[in-house]
Image: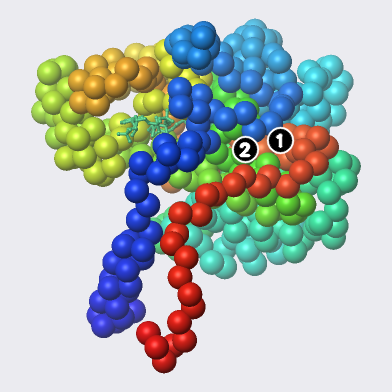
C-alpha cells in the first residue's frame, strides 16, 4: 500500500469510528447483557452441559460471594484427576481426552486402546506437511494452526457429515495430529522466518502426547521424564473449561449452524488467540519482560506497585490497562489451575535457581488486587489465572514462546470437540441472540442527490 492509499484508509477509519459510536448509557436503558453478563457480573445462562464445570463464587440473594475456584471434567474434580495419574506415575492427558469425549473414565484396557489409536493416527496425511505447512509458513503459529485445521477439510473424504461416529472420528484425528501440526508449524517459522535449520521429526506411536511434543519440538528430540510430566500436567489443566469460555462458546455457536468440524475448530482457535483469552500466556511473557526492564529492584514491592499502577492506568506496557495473567470471568479467590501451576513453578524455580524471577511473579499476584482496587475503586476479586505461571514453567522447560498459546490450543481440542458433540446432540437450535437497532432511520437518497 502506498502513502496515498494509507492516508485514504486513515480518513475512512475516522468515518467508521464516528458512525460506529453508540452512547454507552443505551446499554443500561435497554438492559443489554453486555458480554453476555448479568448486572452482577455472572454469565447469562446460555445452555446446559455435562462436559465441564467451573465454580468460582456463590450467589446469595443476587449477590456474588467469592469462593476458591473448583474445576470439574465430566463431574470429576481436576485435583483428583491429577492426583490419580500422578500417583500411578503415568501421563494424564490421554485419560482426560477419553473422559471429555466419552463422558466416563476409561478402564486400563480402554485407556491403552485409546492411546494406541492416538499413536496410530498421529502422522499427517501424505503431502500435508509439504503442501499445507511448509508452503506458506506463518510468523504466528496460531494462524498456522487455524489454516491447517481448515486445510484438513480437503484431506477428509467425509468432512460435512455431522453424525456422532464421524465427528468422533474427526475429533480423535485432530487430537492425535495437533502436536505434529504445531511442531511443524513452529519448525517452518524457525526455518523460513528465523533462518534456522529445518527439522521435521516424525511423531512416535508409543509416546504420549506430551512426549511427542517435546520430541518433535527439539532438534535433538531429547527430553527428560520430568519435563514430559510437567508438560503433560499443563495439557491436562488446559483441556476444558465449561461451555461459556469464549472459544468453547464459539465452537458451539458455529456448530449450531450445522457447519463442519474443521470450521468450528478453526473458529475456536481464532478465539483462543485473543490476548484476553488463551493469548494471555504470550502477553504475560511480554509484560514480564517489560516489568523486568522498568522495575529496577525486583524485590521492592513499592516500586512494583508503582509500575503496576502505571499499567492499569494505561501509561505503561501495551496501553490496554490490563495486567495479563490476572482476573477471570468466573474465578474470584483462586483459579485451581493457577494454584497447581504455581506449585510447579516454585519447585522448578528452586531447582533452577530462578527464585528472584519467581518472586517477581509472586509479587505481581499479591499486589495486583491492591492496585486494582486503589485505581478502579471497584470491589472486584481478581486472582492469578491459568496464564500467569504457565509461561514461566514453559520457559524453564525451554519451550519457545511462539508455541505457548498453540500448546493451549493443542490441549483444548478435546474440550472443544466434546462441546461440539454435545451441541450437535442436545442443542437443536441455531444460537441467535438479539441486537437492538439504535440507528435512526433515513430514506435512501439516490447518488445524484447526496
Ligand atoms: C484462559 C483464559 O482465558 S484466562 C483469562 C486470561 N486473560 C487475561 O489474563 C487478561 C487479563 N484479564 C482480563 O482481561 C479479565 O480479567 C478477563 C477478560 C479475563 C475477565 O474479565 P471479567 O472478569 O469479565 O471482567 P470485566 O471485563 O467485567 O472487567 C471489569 C473491569 O476490570 C478490569 N479488569 C479485569 N481484569 C483486569 C486485569 N487483569 N487487569 C486490569 N484490569 C482488569 C476490566 O478492564 C474492567 O475495567 P473497566 O470497567 O474500567 O473497563
Ligand atoms: O473460562 C474462561 O472464561 C476462560 C478460561 O479460563 C479458559 O477457557 O480456560
Mark closer to the chain start, 2 or 1 = 2
- Please, is residue 425 above or below residue 161 in the view? above
Q: Nearer the viewer, residue 96 or 28?
A: 28
Q: Is residue 348 above or below residue 184?
A: above
Disc number for residue 419: 1
**CB-based contact (under 8 Å), mark 2 and mark 1:** yes
Q: What residue is rendered at 37% in x and 17% in y?
A: 381
Viewport quadrant of the N terminus: bottom left
- Give coordinates of residue 31: x percent, y percent: 48, 36
| 313 relative to 10 in the view: left or right | left
Left or right side of 402 for 356: left
User: How far across and how far down the image is residue 197, in percent?
Assistant: 46, 57
Q: With 436 as the anchor, is 305 left or right in this view? A: left
Within 10 angstroms of label 2, few (less than 14), some, or many (20 or more) residues?
Answer: many
Dot 1, crowdedness within 10 Å: few (<14), some or many (≥20)? many
Q: Nearer the viewer, residue 336 or 156?
A: 336
Ligand 2 contact, mark 2 (Cβ < 8 Å):
yes
Q: CA distance from mark 2 to mark 1?
A: 7 Å
Q: Which mark is residue 248?
A: 2
Residue at image location 74% in from the left, 24% down from the top: 50
Whereabouts is ligand 1, in terms of quadrant? top left
Residue 314's image quarter? top left
Say whether residue 390 is visible: no
Name the element at disc 2. Answer: helix
On residue 439, which mark appears? none
Quadrant in the picture for residue 130: bottom right
Give coordinates of residue 295: x percent, y percent.
14, 29
Q: Quadrant of residue 418?
A: top right
Amino acid at each position: 500500500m502506498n502513502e496515498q492509499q494509507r492516508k485514504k484508509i486513515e480518513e475512512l477509519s475516522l468515518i467508521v469510528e464516528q458512525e460506529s459510536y453508540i452512547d454507552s448509557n443505551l446499554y443500561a436503558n435497554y438492559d443489554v447483557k453486555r458480554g453476555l453478563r448479568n448486572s452482577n457480573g455472572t454469565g447469562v445462562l446460555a445452555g446446559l452441559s455435562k462436559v465441564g464445570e467451573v465454580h468460582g463464587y456463590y450467589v446469595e440473594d443476587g449477590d456474588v460471594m467469592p469462593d476458591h475456584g473448583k474445576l470439574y471434567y465430566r463431574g470429576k474434580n481436576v485435583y483428583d484427576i491429577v492426583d490419580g495419574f500422578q500417583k500411578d506415575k503415568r501421563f494424564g492427558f490421554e485419560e482426560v481426552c477419553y473422559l471429555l469425549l466419552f463422558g466416563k473414565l476409561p478402564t486400563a484396557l480402554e485407556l491403552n486402546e485409546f492411546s494406541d489409536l492416538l499413536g496410530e493416527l498421529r502422522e499427517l496425511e501424505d503431502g500435508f506437511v509439504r503442501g499445507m505447512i511448509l508452503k506458506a509458513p506463518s510468523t504466528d503459529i496460531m494462524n498456522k494452526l487455524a489454516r491447517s485445521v481448515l486445510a484438513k477439510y480437503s484431506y477428509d473424504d467425509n468432512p460435512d457429515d455431522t453424525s456422532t461416529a464421524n465427528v468422533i472420528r474427526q475429533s480423535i484425528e485432530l487430537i492425535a495430529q495437533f502436536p505434529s501440526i504445531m511442531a511443524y508449524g513452529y519448525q517452518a517459522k524457525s526455518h523460513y522466518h528465523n533462518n534456522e535449520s529445518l527439522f521435521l521429526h516424525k511423531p512416535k506411536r508409543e509416546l504420549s502426547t506430551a512426549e511427542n511434543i517435546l520430541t518433535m519440538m527439539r532438534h535433538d528430540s531429547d527430553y527428560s521424564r520430568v519435563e514430559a510430566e510437567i508438560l503433560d500436567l499443563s495439557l491436562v489443566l488446559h483441556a476444558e473449561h465449561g461451555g461459556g469460555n469464549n472459544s468453547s462458546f464459539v465452537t458451539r455457536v458455529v456448530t449450531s449452524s450445522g457447519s463442519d468440524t474443521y470450521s468450528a475448530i478453526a473458529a475456536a482457535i481464532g478465539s483462543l488467540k485473543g490476548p484476553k483469552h488463551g493469548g494471555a500466556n504470550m502477553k504475560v511473557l511480554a509484560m514480564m519482560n517489560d516489568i523486568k526492564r522498568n522495575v529496577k529492584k525486583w524485590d521492592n514491592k513499592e516500586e512494583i506497585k508503582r509500575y503496576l499502577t502505571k499499567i492499569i492506568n494505561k501509561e505503561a506496557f501495551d496501553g490496554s490497562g490490563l495486567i495479563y495473567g490476572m482476573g477471570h470471568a468466573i474465578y474470584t479467590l483462586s483459579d485451581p489451575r493457577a494454584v497447581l501451576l504455581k506449585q510447579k513453578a516454585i519447585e522448578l524455580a528452586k531447582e533452577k535457581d530462578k527464585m528472584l524471577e519467581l518472586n517477581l511473579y509472586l509479587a505481581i499476584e499479591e499486589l495486583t488486587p491492591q492496585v486494582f482496587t486503589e485505581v478502579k475503586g471497584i470491589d472486584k476479586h481478581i486472582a492469578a489465572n491459568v496464564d500467569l505461571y504457565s509461561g514461566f514453567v514453559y520457559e524453564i522447560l525451554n519451550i519457545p514462546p511462539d508455541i505457548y498459546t498453540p500448546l493451549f490450543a493443542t490441549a483444548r481440542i478435546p474440550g472443544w470437540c466434546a462441546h461440539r458433540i454435545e451441541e450437535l446432540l442436545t442443542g437443536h437450535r441455531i444460537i441467535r441472540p438479539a441486537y437492538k437497532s439504535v440507528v435512526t432511520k433515513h430514506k435512501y437518497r439516490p447518488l445524484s442527490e447526496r
